[in-house]
Amino acid sequence: MDMDAICDRRAGAGPPASARTQARELEPAALLERFRAVRSASLQLVSELSAEDQCVQSMPAASPTKWHLAHTSWFFEAMVLQAFVPHYRCFDARYAHLFNSYYESLGPRHARELRGLLTRPPHGEVLRYRRHVDEAVESLSSAGAPAAQAASLLELGLNHEQQHQELMLTDIKHAFYLNPLKPAYRRSEPAAAHSPAPLRWHDHPGGVQQVGHAGAGFAFDNEGPRHAVLLRPFRLSSRAVSCGEYLDFILDGGYQRGELWLSDGWTAVRNQGWNAPLYWEPNGNGRFNVYTLSGLQPLNPGEAVCHLSFYEACAYATWAQARLPTEFEWEAAAATWSGTLHRADPIGLHPEAADVATGRPEPMCGTVWQWTRSSYDPYPGFRPDAGPASEYNGKFMVGQLVLRGGSFATPPGHIRITYRNYFPPDARWQFSGLRLARDA
Amino acid sequence: MDMDAICDRRAGAGPPASARTQARELEPAALLERFRAVRSASLQLVSELSAEDQCVQSMPAASPTKWHLAHTSWFFEAMVLQAFVPHYRCFDARYAHLFNSYYESLGPRHARELRGLLTRPPHGEVLRYRRHVDEAVESLSSAGAPAAQAASLLELGLNHEQQHQELMLTDIKHAFYLNPLKPAYRRSEPAAAHSPAPLRWHDHPGGVQQVGHAGAGFAFDNEGPRHAVLLRPFRLSSRAVSCGEYLDFILDGGYQRGELWLSDGWTAVRNQGWNAPLYWEPNGNGRFNVYTLSGLQPLNPGEAVCHLSFYEACAYATWAQARLPTEFEWEAAAATWSGTLHRADPIGLHPEAADVATGRPEPMCGTVWQWTRSSYDPYPGFRPDAGPASEYNGKFMVGQLVLRGGSFATPPGHIRITYRNYFPPDARWQFSGLRLARDA
Amino acid sequence: MDMDAICDRRAGAGPPASARTQARELEPAALLERFRAVRSASLQLVSELSAEDQCVQSMPAASPTKWHLAHTSWFFEAMVLQAFVPHYRCFDARYAHLFNSYYESLGPRHARELRGLLTRPPHGEVLRYRRHVDEAVESLSSAGAPAAQAASLLELGLNHEQQHQELMLTDIKHAFYLNPLKPAYRRSEPAAAHSPAPLRWHDHPGGVQQVGHAGAGFAFDNEGPRHAVLLRPFRLSSRAVSCGEYLDFILDGGYQRGELWLSDGWTAVRNQGWNAPLYWEPNGNGRFNVYTLSGLQPLNPGEAVCHLSFYEACAYATWAQARLPTEFEWEAAAATWSGTLHRADPIGLHPEAADVATGRPEPMCGTVWQWTRSSYDPYPGFRPDAGPASEYNGKFMVGQLVLRGGSFATPPGHIRITYRNYFPPDARWQFSGLRLARDA
Amino acid sequence: MDMDAICDRRAGAGPPASARTQARELEPAALLERFRAVRSASLQLVSELSAEDQCVQSMPAASPTKWHLAHTSWFFEAMVLQAFVPHYRCFDARYAHLFNSYYESLGPRHARELRGLLTRPPHGEVLRYRRHVDEAVESLSSAGAPAAQAASLLELGLNHEQQHQELMLTDIKHAFYLNPLKPAYRRSEPAAAHSPAPLRWHDHPGGVQQVGHAGAGFAFDNEGPRHAVLLRPFRLSSRAVSCGEYLDFILDGGYQRGELWLSDGWTAVRNQGWNAPLYWEPNGNGRFNVYTLSGLQPLNPGEAVCHLSFYEACAYATWAQARLPTEFEWEAAAATWSGTLHRADPIGLHPEAADVATGRPEPMCGTVWQWTRSSYDPYPGFRPDAGPASEYNGKFMVGQLVLRGGSFATPPGHIRITYRNYFPPDARWQFSGLRLARDA
């Protein structure tokens, strides 16, 4: 999902939101507790980054850490506080210009590619901004149960901030990688090299399947409406493709064989000089080191391959005489195989944390985002929500591909099997890998 | 469909092609007659263009007329003659380099964006090349019924050449438009200005529907396999959107209202300075003239609007409180409403030729290509054919949108309701308009 | 000199032009004879090019042959006929838009990079345009001696057309080179391979020297005013650098050694992938073939090296422990060594025609244009002429370097030792080489 | 002068440097005192900038403050300490890669346009790096009089650092300007609005004049050799052009009249949308505010106009029926009018600090850099110095124009009348204005 697409979801103003809102329990104390936990987690993630680190922007599609911290606060301010707190005093009226990501309806804004120039407001001022917003939300909540709509928007804001937590990691990783000093985001010991578990194929009978979200819990608007699709029988692999397997593809000339690639992918290979996933670096002995959040480490063949573009995922699948699953095949399989939905591990530092070596069935979620063979189109009956949050998802529904499953860096509790992430086909800086499918 | 994507389809080598081939009657005499007719039609289309006109390339996505004439001949040479004629003598071995469009498996080739530099071979030589190929095909055919596979590839080549016939018109129109003299491709009287027929809505019940091609006639590989889809009830408008209706959108500020647009579309509007369809020119009195194959003419409000990007089609639909149909809705409706499939008129000069004024139900096909809300993804079970023709369609299945229905410039007999044309969302030089849909 | 900069010089309106005009004999019959000869020579140059060949534009800096033919005619029309022929009837009023090169004062014009799209007016029509202009000039001349100012502008137009004659060759050569068929402009036998004459150094004492044009003959405005400069003693080589010598530079790693290059030159080497002069092609045996107006031919070590950028000329000179002469050193030397000013040969087909093998002092002019170490700045006291011709030279006096001496393709009689040609430092498609200098 | 061109001058290795070195007195104690003063001044300049501020890079031509601080230290390390201190221990061997600006002979280096990504080494570490270098230089100096060559290189390093002091101001100003908050570098009261002193013309007789540096004091290699030039009589205006005068040019349509501009300049005006100097902002009342180092302030008509490109300076001069002086005219005049060489004021905050209102002759130096009509070509006999410092100036001698005179931000004592600054003709972020000249 485009950097900003991952930011702001829907606000719940208007009937569709209300409908979804009222369908679920909104317990004020629990919501406030969750607010504190999410807001605190953001600061925890950046605790070892300096003010300089937090200011840098490595490319237009990435944002500075400080900008993420401010933007997620602005989101609460613009969507909740200004709408529901009488006489709310904005922390700084100019911040709407600086920290609005892409909401046309909320006015003009600072150019995305210039976010890295915002040395002012200084880092400390952004922390003060966060506290200002936190206090206002606390007051709003302690003043009695907030209106259902406000509660719904608060919940949206929390999910929004969780999306940015993962982006803070992908973006700082990219910035650090471009620094010749190759600094580490956090120190940790690399996992011991291991082989992946054997890859097995699981059959699914296809047929009419219900997909999309419905029911009580939170979901983004692009996950609905829930509807039936008709699937052919298919097979899905038991785990994500591993680094070792992907290395075989490279050694077999994968990046030199045009027939394996989509036409746009082959153009990207040649124009960008791709010959391995992003962050793989030749180690001089014909193999690779991999730059991770813990710095440069030897390639671990048993880990899930990560930082692939859609093009690379497709080419690998073709080479492996397989294909990518559609998003509906993926979701139908995940619904069937529940109970192994998510890894229990806390947030890891790089995909190495994804253990594909154990032999037990790998969960569908929580290792790497998995590219699907589905363009990011609207579901039948989809309508963007009313209000500013209408711009959260709907307007990005062209030119992107759906990813499913969340990664090791997706905050716990944030992923769902109906969750639709989306990015352009050449994006590689996300924690994106693949899982194979075949016709039955 | 990308310029070249429209060129070369599958060759029929290998089982899938054979299967499709054997399913239909291949009557040698009829095939040869059709060959003569199609080849002759190409020359007829360019009969009023000079050698200079036929050499020019206005942009990388467009090709010179002469290149089209040579490339379609090369296609027969590479796919049929070299494979099925013993000791076939190539007209010029270097032409494979010059006139291969995008077949990686057939070797390196001249850069697409430099096709306009090919003043040599001269025009007359390309005509000689065509005759050389024609004679070889005649010999092959008269030597007895060609093998089923050869016949199948001949038929593919004919459909391929018909695709290029339409492209010759879109491309020369674009080149002439960029000439300040605004020359006309062919002289004709403009239709009298008129109002469109009233727009009506036709209901479709949805449900499980079969889509895609199967059976005896020719189809491209991307039209299959035929398979079932599940549709919600929907409504489809009785005709394409007219120029007059689109003018209302413009006058209502359509190009200034970001909320109507997809995000990428809004970016295109601002970066490209779009404020009307391609070829619309302000006439100084607040209205527009339209550049057509017959030159600059007054806008005719009753004609189908044409030369829209997908982005513009979407924005218009949003403004009209409607949406684009999916390609499956379109096809299901067309299957139901058969009998009015195609206009009877001969090839016209511009969309004005599409009469939307009569009040009778407009045919689904033959006016303007209609953008759908479907990304160009593979059908379930789709596999590109074996052999060089495998590159015809499959490798372009990302980043494009499906158009349905053919235009006034699509050769008679070439269109089908299962036919999937495809182009990137910002393409405007094709004869592309839209038809509206709504949820029931 | 920028493509267009070479086109249009000054018109003679106003005192400076008049002054220069009256200083020289203007004999009507001789002028008319010269007009016929120059106009005819242009057509002679293109006699073997097809209409297609004459329409093509290979890059923004080059123009189609047909455009050159029309533009030089428009120059007479705009500068002479419209100003001095009462009731002159323009051939086509729209041509001022199409064929104005860069004269802001003469109105808006067709974008330079789109000149190759002008398939209309057709080739035959441009020839009719030329005859229309020819007849009008004949009438003007036969109606009695034209006014001095008209005669002066006619002479300017002739020199202008001669500049374009050389450009027609450089531009068609470039276009043909980009065609994989590598067609030849004209067939001729390559000269036998030979060694160059020994390179000798000629001393010049420096001191106060007069440079720039004065006196009776024609000159462009940028050649004046004549003025004194102060030179240090210097040495100049007896001939241009040869292909064989330049090959030594290449084999010595010239294109891999950053220390030999100006900073911008080194950037160009890396960004453009330069590793030899334009038109040199590796022959597979570690040496080179050279694409010439007669097609691809073996490198002839005795010929003058050609198609160098200023950067390459500088790097070669540094490698040879020498430097480029300033334009004033060049001119002072040429003034001293007169009598060997120009080769007697008729126009050749490629630099091979420049015989540097004979041992006799090579003339300063007529082999290859020689880059100097002088930026193209105005002379002291320079003022552009009044009228539209003021835009001929003056406005290009930044960012370009001066070349001196004319090439084998410069029309006979067109060159002077005061002649200042100019091009940007990265231009390579002109017939540009170098001659070495050293401090005494 | 290109950002980096301003960094590193000559090292003094080899005879030419030695020659220049020995020509002047090198008093150890004075040199050390000067070292301390210059190094301290750099830190003083950045004392109010945060670590974030010091890390940002607003465009490829500008560098982060922190990078300037580190690069100037690396220069001492690479040119002096590693060459003259036995067993010198580099602070961090990787810094040569990070902080080498453009010295090909000193190895590969970090891409210029990515300097803003260097959040590591952190700000504090760069300060430690500076102290490490300072201490090593102190030790070197206190160990007895350093060798003449080392002293010469130390002096070069100090002049190099002074160049970067001005660049730190131009670069942070540019970065702050792109921040919508428009922060001020330093707070100060704007000068009261005033009118400029009347502009007068001073005659110079021309003739043979000595230009370039010779003698005892420090100079960069591009200032020599001193040599004679021949000048025509000319007139030079008594002061720089003021903001009020430049405003008249704007109000007279200066940015809409193509005939006033060089061709490349007119292209820049249209492509970049220029309609005023950099940092001028319409105030809504038809006039302008000007962004200064003290923030946005009302335009002061009496101040010297600043932040012009060469193109704008030329167009203004043409409009004023004058021209730019050549660099030799400028220098000859400055030599004549000595005694008023430099403003006595300490470093100011913006050109407003340049008082052009007093009526007394304005000094030639210290207000704004003045574009000359001289391309940056080598002087006769110029040879870059031996050693790494050979890349300091010589390799940039193409495509740039000479500026003379220093600005209010040039450190005191750093300017000379022989000083040649240079930048590309479209550069506007330097403190660049103009002074008019005319033929006598």
Image (cartoon, coloured by chain):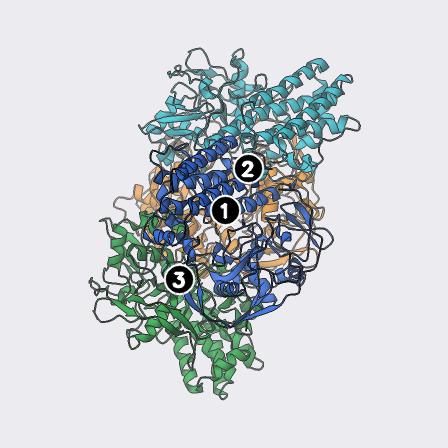
Chain colours: A cyan, B orange, C green, D blue
Instruction: Identify which amino acid the numbered label 1 is placed on.
Output: Gln
Camera-near label (2 vs 1) is 1
Camera-near label (2 vs 3) is 2
Instruction: Identify which amino acid the numbered label 2 is placed on.
Output: Gln
> Disc 2 or 1, which lies upstream in sequence?
2
Q: Which residue is mark 2?
A: D54
Co-location on one chain, circles 3 and 1: no
| Residue B342 image position (x, y, % from top left) | 57, 43
| Residue A322 image position (x, y, % from top left) | 41, 25
Q: Are marks 3 and 1 in contact (CB under 8 Å)?
A: no
Co-location on one chain, circles 2 and 1: yes
Question: For the residues marked 3 and 1, what is the alpha-carbon distance in whole angstroms?
Answer: 49 Å
Co-location on one chain, circles 2 and 3: no
Q: Which residue is mark 3?
A: C171
Examine the rendering and report whether any part of residue A60 can be seen: no
Q: Secondary structure at mark 1?
A: helix
Toward the viewer: D401 or C267? Answer: D401
